[in-house]
Image: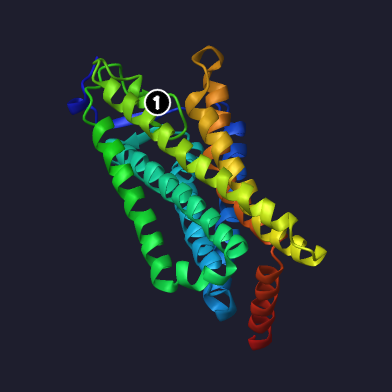
Amino acid sequence: MANSSSITHFLLLPFSGTRQLQLLHFCLFLAIYLAALLGNGLIITTIAWDHHLHTPMYFFLLNLALTDIGCISTTVPKSMENSFWDTRDISYTGCAAQVFFVFCLFATEFSLLTTMSYDRYVAICRPLHYETLLGSRVCLHMAAAAWACGCLYGLLHTANTFSLPLCQGNVVEQFFCEVPQILKLSCSTSYLRELWLLVASVCLYFVCFVFIVVSYVQIFRAVLRIPSQQGRHKAFATCLPHLVVVSLFLSTGMFAYLKPSSISSPSLDLVVSALYSVVPPAVNPLIYSLRNQELKDSLRKMTTRCFQKQ
């Protein structure tokens, strides 16, 4: 039995005890990680390069790409390192850093997704007031507020979690430091503080989700009234990718944290956590670029100009 003051490191759950499968996991995560860096990096570079994309929608998309890079960089590299070197260790400080950045970046991402739904609502339902309601200064303030709230949220969870006395060992049954798994190591009823904080977080996410749903109900009502089929297609093309990203983010995250303990198992927890922490940052660039003609055109122009310079 050990208390939190004597714990210097934690042991993460490996994906497999077989060396060949560990290397397979390393290669799979490496491919996903590189795809996420490439996809999100291209979105950031394209938006920064093309002044035609310096609009509120693409400004928030750039911030979303930054959070996706941060999210996947928080958990995947350490998991790859452990698989490659056949270890399970993560330092106490490294574990606390993972908890902070996971909560900070995911809260920031959901705040940005909520803000993007408001952006689409104003653009489609109140186009004449778009410049007034979403000027450059307003967008900067909204993005700064999203990042500030995310940092505060992450700090609150990290301080609350690691102030708990831990006396059930140091084995975290997850491939990264996930708060529900750390709470299982607590030997005190004070873990209820963090539990209530998680419940409050779910309520906050639900309120944001309701705001997004209401926004899109108004958006789809307005889109269906557009007489031009081309206009409806363009409106749906800019809204549907955002709605898909929101659905993927929420469904995987909520299932990971709210699934009944009766169906919980180490293998299922690993898969579910990978779904909400690894898959969305990798597929978000693909979702946004497939139906966004402006982004594809700008990316094509940028790559063509780069090759011409060479």
Q: Whole-percent x and y of residue 97? A: 32, 43
Q: Is residue 179 left or right of residue 39?
A: left
Q: Which residue is mark 1?
A: 180
| Residue in front for this viewpoint, 256 or 5 | 256
SS assignment at label 1: helix
Q: In the image, residue 207 lies at what x, y percent?
A: 46, 39
Name the quadrant of the N terminus: top left
Q: What residue appears at the point 27 percent right and 25 percent down from the top-left corner? A: 193
Question: As drawn, is 171 to the left or to the right of 18?
Answer: left
Q: Nearer the viewer, residue 81 or 266?
A: 266
Give the amino acid at mark 1.
Answer: Pro
Question: Is residue 31 visible from the viewing direction of this image?
Answer: no
Left or right: 115, with 94 as reference point: right
As drawn, 256 above or below 249: above
Name the residue rendered at 51%, 64% in the picture: 62
Which residue sits at x=38%, y=71%?
137
- Looking at this view, name the residue that lies furthest to the top: 262
Question: Label 1: few (<14), some or many (≥20) within 10 Å?
Answer: some
Going by the picture, which residue comes out furthest to the left? 5
Q: Horizontal and vertical percent for residue 279? A: 59, 43
Display coloring: rainbow
**Quadrant in the picture for the C terminus:** bottom right
The quadrant holding residue 41 is bottom right
Residue 149 locus on image (x, y percent): 33, 50
Q: Residue at x 37, y 46 (%)?
A: 104
In this rendering, is residue 104 above or below 225?
above
Residue 220 lies, with reference to residue 157, above or below; the image says below
The reply to whether residue 232 is in sight is yes
